[in-house]
Amino acid sequence: MVSAIDNIVVEAVGLTKIFKDFWGRPKARAVNNIDFNIRQGQVFGLLGPNGSGKSTTVKMILGLLYPNRGMLKVFGEEPRDVDMKSRIGYLPEETYLYKYLTAMETLDFFGALFGLSADKRRERSMQLLDMVGLSHAVNRPVGEFSKGMARRIGLAQALINDPDLVILDEPTSGLDPIGCREVKDVIRLLASRGKTVILSSHLLADVQDVCDEVVILYGGKIRASGELQEILKEEDKTRIIAPRLNDSVVSELKDWLLEHGVKTVEQVKVDHPNRDLEEFFLDVVRQAQAQSVDTAGAQSGGEVPAYLVAGEDGPAQAKRGKAVLDALRRPEEVKPIQEEEPAAEPEAQVDLSKLEKLGAEPLKVEEEPASSEEEAADAAAKAREEANLRLSKLKGED
Ligand SMILES: Nc1ncnc2c1ncn2[C@@H]1O[C@H](COP(=O)(O)OP(=O)(O)O)[C@@H](O)[C@H]1O
Ligand SMILES: [Mg+2]
């Protein structure tokens, strides 16, 4: 849904990102001179096959990568502006989590980075875990989570600060159809609350269901763009859907159409529309759930937290967004070896020491488990202690 006020949240003009190889030669024009505007309340889709420049665009909007050329404004500010980052929620393409922290501790950790009080962190974490269908796994270490469960907690993490701009890089990857549908419902809800959502995906069905406007990227360039309804509309065709008609009626209808301007009978197509596979699938699962068939893993999501529906934070929200983005970055992104950097602005570099304080290396979810249960418990206790220590140090900063 497009906001009545033409409030531009993200503005890009001539945006360009070139990655260089070891010798400094241009290697990949990841993003090549693109223009777009994203308005408040829009769900904006960045579409394109693998390697088309979606994640690079997202990272420039977040201030994690710096454009070589072009203008980019987010909420009217430079993407590196720290205050602005507390208004953003980000789900990275790959969910990197601290594997020994439980689901609850993970959300608490990110909530603390945004400066939320302990009470608010607890309240929001519980509500978000319920929303993404993980309330049964509150105390399980996220290292044990399946890919779908990790995606769900990643989404919860992206919403803990009640952001105005939510950036979701391939949010439905690894999710089952129920999870996909829930994510899409959350996205629509956020937009209806006036929040802006940027969604990168190569899964066209997901985009078609939720996006107001899309750009289709290929080779770093925008190949098509516009409002989805407009792009997909076939202006020169008309479809009529009616209750089942018998053959004689169909034949009479065809004759009538031929008398009224349709040139040949081949131009008229009559069939029975297919049911949407997603709807059908969800029906089957709902029936199984009604019969109380057991399942492991993530469950269907619950209610959307009241704070996301109603909104309660003013602009006074703590300005801790940058620390959160730093925590979400992959280690190799902290200092891209091949990246062409404008030399003039060293302060724009991510603060490596901050990342270290946050917990050395963010660990991938699919890590090997520890060899014995005792060892795992030991390691978990240690990691938790260390994370808490780092967290308290971090909170003491600024
Ligand atoms: N850190 C990097 N160093 C060098 N090349 C990169 C880097 N990140 C992305 N690229 C290249 O930029 C192009 C666009 O990548 P990306 O934005 O990740 O695409 P998408 O998200 O659409 O799959 C690809 O050719 C990719 O190989
Ligand atoms: Mg990507």
Image (cartoon, grey):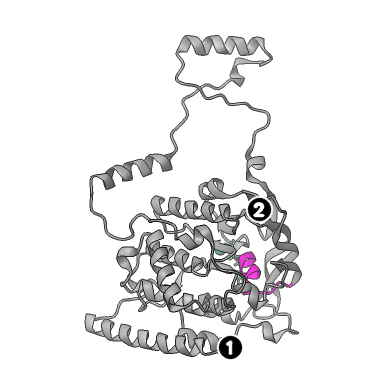
SS class, disc 2: strand
Image height of 282 relative to 377, above or below: above
Q: Determine crowd level at label 2: few under 14, some 14-19, many 20+ residues with C-alpha closer than 10 A.
A: many
The residue depicted at 68 percent of the width and 56 percent of the height is: 39
**Image location (x, y in percent) of residue 345:** 72, 84
Read off the magenta span.
Answer: 56-68
The residue beneath circle 2 is 215
Q: How many marks?
A: 2
Give the Cα distance between marks 1 and 2: 39 Å
The residue beneath circle 1 is 398
Specify the amino acid type for callout 2: Val
- Residue 326 lies in what quarter of the image? bottom right
Which quadrant contains ligand 2?
A: bottom right
Image height of 343 relative to 35, above or below: below
The disc, 1 or 2, on the residue closer to the chain's N-terminal end is 2
The residue depicted at 60 percent of the width and 74 percent of the height is: 316
Q: Nearer the viewer, mark 1 or mark 2?
A: 1
**Image location (x, y in percent) of residue 157:** 47, 69
Q: Is residue 363 visible in this depiction of the protein?
A: no
Image height of 305 relative to 368, above or below: above
Q: Determine crowd level at label 1: few under 14, some 14-19, many 20+ residues with C-alpha closer than 10 A.
A: few
Specify the amino acid type for callout 1: Asp
**Toward the viewer: 289 or 304?**
304
The residue depicted at 64 percent of the width and 27 percent of the height is: 237
